[in-house]
Image: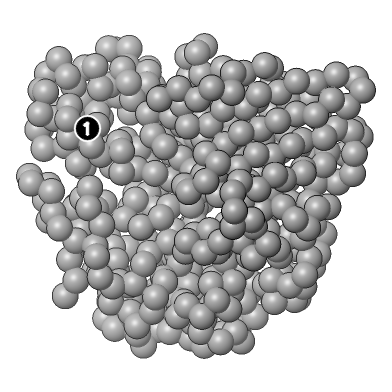
Amino acid sequence: MLQSPRSPGIPAAEDEVIGSNRRPTSGARLLAVGGGKGGVGKTFIAANLAAVLARLGKRVVVVDVDLDGANLHTCLGVPSPRRSLADFVSEREEDLGKLLVDTPLANLKLIGATHANLADSQPSHLRRVRLVRGLRQLDADIVLLDLGAGTHASVLDYFLVSDDGILVLQPEPTSVENAYSFLRAAFYRRMRLAMVGHGVRQLITLAMDQRNERGIQTPIDLLREIEATDTAEARRFVDTMRVFRPRIIVNGARTAEDVKLGFAVSSVCKKYFGIDAEYLGYVNYDDEARRSVSMRRPIVDLHSDADVSIYLQRIARKLIGLPSTNASVHGPTKTAVHAPPNHRPDSQMSARPPGANAAATSANTSTNTSTNTSTTTSAVTSTTTSTTGTNRTVNTAPSSTRATATVRAPDSRVGSGRNEGPGGLS
């Protein structure tokens, strides 16, 4: 049975779910699509990314782990499965392979979450351990998890154990606030279970209370406290921070400011949490996307040439390390992102997390930030505006090459350019 290598001192069951600082080298690759708030489009993104990956020749299994609100099967055009993950949770079925359901798309299978026990829908900790082991053993290249909303332990564990945790947010204050709450909860859960010393674990638990008596407000504050207590644990803390690398997708972008929200969130994650969060790209708002859900078909299958489909395809290709189909192979790609005439000022969409100190406000993309990236900042934006529509330049550092996006205002809608990278970020 496949097992991930265990960090010294971490209980086997906990480490199997949360994962050590090394990922398994065999078995299916796990991707988790989550986000703190319901209704931000997690299921839409999960279904369409799964469809694109299957079209690219990958053997994909998409799993609905939202046992309290299962609807992934509907987005894929699959009738409500009679057998589902609920049977595994209730121990009526041990073999996950028997829960696989065919979808209308080649190379794509589904494990639904229908018919859950309303009295006790979530699996126990040990059951989650067995689920993760079983998912990695499926005959698939990629297993993609569609997570539920909120910060339940099961949701956080699936996000943390995955090889890539993808955070979906919409350019709305409520979504941004809940995204930070989700990241904060996931961060502290991983840290608490990665630490060995009981005293340090208690310190992390204390820090999870934002009104704690020791005044620990940020992970950097916490690190200072741990360093004063145990230098070995402080090193472990830093090592664990380095491997916690969530990836961000902005869904429903309408304006240039919406697009830049992903850069700002990534920057704040570095400054406030001390973690590197990669901005995968954005998906523009499109009424066709809503219609595709009503028609129970992924938008990439229903309208593969729509802008939203092209952006989803590019994000999926980026996830598996493939270049965008029309991205330049000779160097960075310049991308034009067009804002509508009556776009919102940057100040209306703050990327600052709740409880962050005043320094975190410098991560917002609104005013004249230096384009020289420091060693502690992963995303930097430089914005120069005027009433005559002066160009705005946004620089970001993706995993492989540096991309440059030129934001012109005022002009036409976001997503009108077909030569843009994955969500305008190739």
Q: Look at the image and tell me whether residue 340 can be seen.
A: yes
Apparent side of residue 365 relative to residue 91 in the rendered image (left or right):
right
Name the residue located 51 percent from the left edge and 35 percent from the top edge.
266
Apparent side of residue 219 relative to residue 340 in the rendered image (left or right):
left
Q: Quadrant of residue 73?
A: bottom right
Looking at this view, is 96 or 376 the one in front? 376
Q: Position of residue 331 (x, y in %)?
A: 59, 49
Q: Position of residue 312 (x, y in %)?
A: 64, 61
Vertical position of residue 347 compared to residue 195: above or below: above
Vertical position of residue 1 compared to residue 380: above or below: below
Q: Position of residue 149 (x, y in %)?
A: 51, 51
| Residue underneath mark 1 | 237
Apparent side of residue 416 relative to residue 380 in the rendered image (left or right):
right
Vertical position of residue 10 compared to residue 102: above or below: above
The color scheme shown is one colour
Vertical position of residue 138 compared to residue 168: above or below: below
| Count of numbered circles on the image | 1
Name the residue located 33 percent from the left edge and 79 percent from the top edge.
138
Quarter of the figure that contains the N terminus: bottom left
Name the residue located 46 percent from the left edge and 26 percent from the top edge.
377
Q: Position of residue 241 (x, y in %)?
A: 30, 36
Looking at this view, is 31 or 98 the one in front? 31
Give the residue furthest to the front.
Answer: 330
Other residues around mark 1 within 10 Å, as few (<14) / some (14–19) / many (≥20): many
Q: Amino acid at mark 1?
A: Phe
Looking at this view, is 341 or 87 the one in front? 341
Q: Look at the image and tell me whether residue 361 can be seen.
A: no
Label 1 element class = helix
